[in-house]
Amino acid sequence: VVANISTSYGAIAQSLILVEDSSMSVERRVFACAGFMILLSLVLGVAASPIFVSEYWLWFTAFVGANLFQTAFTGFCPLAMILKKLGGKAGTAF
């Protein structure tokens, strides 16, 4: 079961990052990736989850949330910079 879950999460993560599909702007990819990472780290960090690994995953949740918070004020987003360099189309936010 864990192998199937990790395979499906890998496919989702890969589709969020690949910039070949031009239907999503960089901003939408950043928001989708951040949301996915938050949900994944919560599933891995909450003891009631069926795929619980360690409570330390909650630190990753806090990191992603803090990065989203600082991006709202500064406009600096490392993932957006990477996606633009890979050829993603920019929207209006970054």
Image (cartoon, helix red, strand yellow):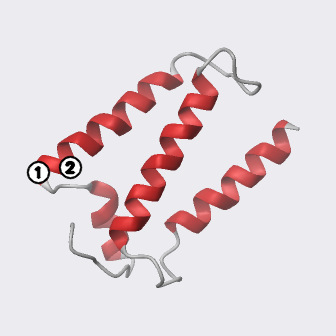
Q: Of the residues shown, which amino acid type is indicated by label 2? A: Thr
Residue 54: x, y in percent?
61, 18
User: Quick one: quadrant of the N terminus?
Assistant: top right
Q: Secondary structure at mark 1?
A: helix
Residue at 69% x, 60% y: name it: 11
Residue sitting at the far right: 1
Q: Residue at x 39, y 66 (%)?
A: 28
Task: Report the residue marked by disc 1.
Answer: 74
Percent coordinates x, y for residue 45 in the rendering: 58, 22
Above or below 93: residue 63: above
Residue at label 2?
71
The x and y percentages for residue 58 are 48, 23
Q: Residues within 10 Å of mark 1 (few under 14, many from 20)?
A: few
Taking the view exactly as shown, the residue that stands out farthest to the left is 74
**Left or right side of 7 for 54:** left
Asked where in the image residue 5 lies, by quadrant, the reply is top right
Q: Is residue 34 left or right of residue 90?
A: right
Q: Quadrant of residue 39?
A: top right
Residue flagged by tag 1: what amino acid is it? Thr
Q: Looking at the image, do the residues carrying marks 1 and 2 touch, with CB atoms under 8 Å apart?
A: yes
On-image quarter of the C terminus? bottom left
